[in-house]
Image (cartoon, coloured by chain):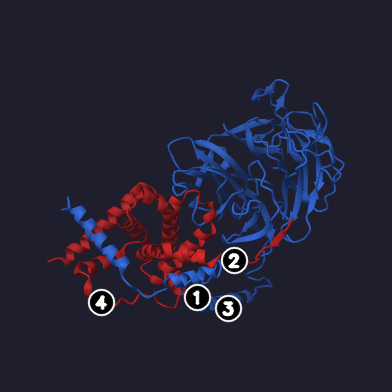
């Protein structure tokens, strides 16, 4: 068959060339050699010799050492200027259904497996399963089999020290420990999944409910994550629903809110929120909260930010300053200095990519990057939800993606500032089936 | 609850299963990676990375029909990444050795048409991204949309890369013809 156009003829020539090129015999590892490499385990040495580079790197290291030794006024050029952080993600291993893998990614994007929990029963609720404290305590909810009724599962919380994952963990157990009436209730997050909220000093706020027939009384109490000791603070909560708690960074209190009353759950009926102090006192706050908030952060000075389907509100002294990016905001993260926050935004229509934006003021939104959805796998799937987390020192941004096709997702970290941040939905980020759990301080 | 300390050894996979998996895909993947990298050792590195990832995550694949494009996607992206790294000045500085070139056998040189010499020179001069889309679209038969999904770029970008690559290859061919 003759070619129809010059372009067709060119394509045919290129195809012939490529077929010849790929069919050529060249020196290099054959399939048998590759089998040997892979059989040696993941991470086997690659083909290229690293020796010449190692020589250069050694010389470079010596040069840096010399420079570091040339201290001026006793100060080293490489002095440690603060803690370093690692993003912690959780993943279930589908190949082994009862396995939960805890992964960390450092500032250079290096992935490391922190722990593997072999007896982690996959719960029925979606991730995130737990959160991690800055000191490296991970709270993992574990459903118990002895559920007294069909409405709610009993739950225990296992506290794992990620710096010493092989040591015995603490279990806050509703059966064997002090809180034998502890029950999971459905109101901690909009989707009903249980969560804890870590605060400074490794305390976390634990919601629970008395087991009784008929209407139940709900309480909030503080737990010491290091010892498992239950504080004597039992703040009663009689509303049906609570929005997400948010700690003040200085630990002075935790912001909680309730948004449903006898007349239903509507923004017009939103009740005041308050600051629950560690001593059990509640300071009714001057601010109100939108009932459709899906995430929020509290800065500790009376100012907070809420995320809702209708936009972001910076709340201060009861006033709202609406942010209106073109799209749905799925998460927000304050900077350490509180001078702005990062947003994850799903465009309202038309565009494919998710956006990462930084707000320095309600009227100043800066596009910092996008999440490239064109390469999601399986083909045609979209990223459903994504979450951003800013390291406590503002050095890194963690991005966690959930795909609509199932429990798969991706996690990645990116240096900040990122002038042209592009977050791949796959590729160099690693695949997770959990979510971003928080930041853990690690040694440099 | 059993907690395994980080860094514990990975489970040992049956060698026969790995062998079958590699044998089925290796030649095609190496051909793809060589076209992109223009460097056999880097191509083998890219293929090794792709096969490792695919083997490790094979249980997440819900439809076996997606295996081939999945592998191609991993390998072509790794190949582009390695080629980009090689092109960087810092990478060249840190690597004392020049890029390893395959030793072409005499009978191969004797058997190809003269136009292939020009095409090879022009093809090598393309960017890794351009070589990737040319290889995927014209040699492996992926549509523009499929190619876009594999390389992680919008379809318009793929069309643009194809157009620029064709122009350059055509120019080289025309210059070599009497």
Residue A329 — which label? Answer: none
The image shows residue B21 at horizontal and vertical percentages of 47, 62
Q: Which residue is mark 1?
A: A50
Report the residue marked by disc 3: A62
Dots 2 and 1 on the same chain: no
Q: Are marks 3 and 4 on the same chain?
A: no
Mark 1 / mark 3, whichever is N-terminal: 1
* Mark closer to the observer (2, 3): 2
Q: Which mark is residue B107?
A: 4
Chain rendered red: B
**Marked residue chain, label 2:** B
Q: Find out whether the residues at labels 1 and 3 contact each other: C-beta distance under 8 Å.
A: no
Whether discs 1 and 3 lie on one chain: the answer is yes
Tell me which chain the residue with mark 4 is part of: B
Mark yes or no: residue A429 visible.
no
State the CA–CA distance, disc 2 to disc 4: 42 Å
**What colour is chain A?**
blue
Which residue, given by chain and number where applicable, does mark 2 sit on? B12
**Front in this rendered view, residue A282 or A37:** A37
Question: Does the image show residue B71?
Answer: yes
Return the x and y of residue A224 as percentages of the image width and height: 81, 49
User: Closer to us: mark 2 or mark 4?
Assistant: 2
Asked which quadrant contains residue A320, the reply is top right
Alpha carbon separation for disc pair 1 and 3: 18 Å
Classify 10 Å Cα crowding around label 2: few (below 14), some (14-19), many (20 and above). few
Mark 1: which secondary structure? loop
Residue occupying image coordinates x 47% and y 49%? B63
* Secondary structure beneath label 3: helix
**Mark 2 residue element:** loop
- Where's residue B34, x and y in %? 37, 66
Callout 4 secondary element: helix
CA gap between label 2 and label 3 equals 39 Å
């Amino acid at each position: 068959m003759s070619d129809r156009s010059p372009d067709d003829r060119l394509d045919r020539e290129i195809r012939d060339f490529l077929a010849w090129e790929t069919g050529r015999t060249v020196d290099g590892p054959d399939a048998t050699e590759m089998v040997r490499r892979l059989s040696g385990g993941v991470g086997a040495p690659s083909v290229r010799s690293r020796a010449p580079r190692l020589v250069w790197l050694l010389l470079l290291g010596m040069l840096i050492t010399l420079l570091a030794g040339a201290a001026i006024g006793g100060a080293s050029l490489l002095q440690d200027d603060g803690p370093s952080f690692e993003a912690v993600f959780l993943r279930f291993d589908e190949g082994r259904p009862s396995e939960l893998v805890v992964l960390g990614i450092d500032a250079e994007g290096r992935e490391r497996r922190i722990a593997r929990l072999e007896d982690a029963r996959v719960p029925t609720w979606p991730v995130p399963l737990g959160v991690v404290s800055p000191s490296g305590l991970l709270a993992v909810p574990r459903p118990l089999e002895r559920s007294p009724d069909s409405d709610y599962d009993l739950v225990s919380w296992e506290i794992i020290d990620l710096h010493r994952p092989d040591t015995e963990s603490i279990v806050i157990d509703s059966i064997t420990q002090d809180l034998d009436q502890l029950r999971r209730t459905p109101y901690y997050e909009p989707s009903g999944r249980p969560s804890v909220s870590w605060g400074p000093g490794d305390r976390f706020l634990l919601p629970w409910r008395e087991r009784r027939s008929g209407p139940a009384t709900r309480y909030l109490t503080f737990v010491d994550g290091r010892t498992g000791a239950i504080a004597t603070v039992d703040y009663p909560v009689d509303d049906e629903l609570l929005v997400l708690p948010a700690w003040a960074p200085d630990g002075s209190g935790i912001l909680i809110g309730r948004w449903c009353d006898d007349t239903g759950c509507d923004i017009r009926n939103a009740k005041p929120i308050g600051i629950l102090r560690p001593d059990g006192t509640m300071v009714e706050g001057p601010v109100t909260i939108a009932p459709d908030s899906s995430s929020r952060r509290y800065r500790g000075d009376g100012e907070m930010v809420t995320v809702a389907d209708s936009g972001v509100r910076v709340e201060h002294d009861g006033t709202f300053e609406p942010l209106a990016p073109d799209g749905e905001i799925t998460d927000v993260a304050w900077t350490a200095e509180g001078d702005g926050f990062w947003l994850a935004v799903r465009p309202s229509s038309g565009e494919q990519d998710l956006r990462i934006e930084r707000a320095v003021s309600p009227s100043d939104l800066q596009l910092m990057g996008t999440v490239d959805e064109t390469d999601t796998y399986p083909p045609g799937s979209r990223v459903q939800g994504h979450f951003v987390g800013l390291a406590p020192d503002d050095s890194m941004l963690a991005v966690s993606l959930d795909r609509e096709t199932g429990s798969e997702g991706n996690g990645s970290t990116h240096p900040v500032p990122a002038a042209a941040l592009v977050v791949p939905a796959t590729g160099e980020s690693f695949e997770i089936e959990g979510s971003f759990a928080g930041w853990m301080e690690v040694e440099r | 609850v059993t907690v395994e300390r980080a860094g514990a050894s990975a489970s040992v996979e049956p060698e026969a299963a790995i062998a079958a998996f590699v044998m089925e895909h290796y030649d095609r993947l190496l051909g793809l990676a060589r076209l992109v990298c223009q460097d056999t050792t880097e191509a083998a590195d890219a293929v090794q990375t792709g096969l490792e990832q695919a083997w490790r995550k094979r249980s997440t694949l819900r439809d076996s029909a997606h295996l081939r494009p999945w592998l191609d996607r991993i390998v072509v992206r790794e190949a582009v990444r390695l080629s980009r790294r090689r092109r960087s000045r810092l990478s060249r500085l840190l690597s004392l050795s020049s890029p390893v070139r395959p030793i072409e056998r005499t009978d191969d040189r004797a058997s190809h048409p003269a136009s292939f010499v020009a095409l090879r020179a022009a093809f090598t001069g393309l960017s890794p991204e351009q070589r990737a889309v040319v290889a995927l679209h014209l040699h492996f038969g992926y549509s523009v949309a499929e190619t876009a999904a594999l390389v992680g770029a919008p379809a318009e970008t793929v069309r643009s890369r194809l157009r620029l690559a064709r122009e350059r290859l055509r120019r080289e061919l025309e210059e070599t013809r009497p």
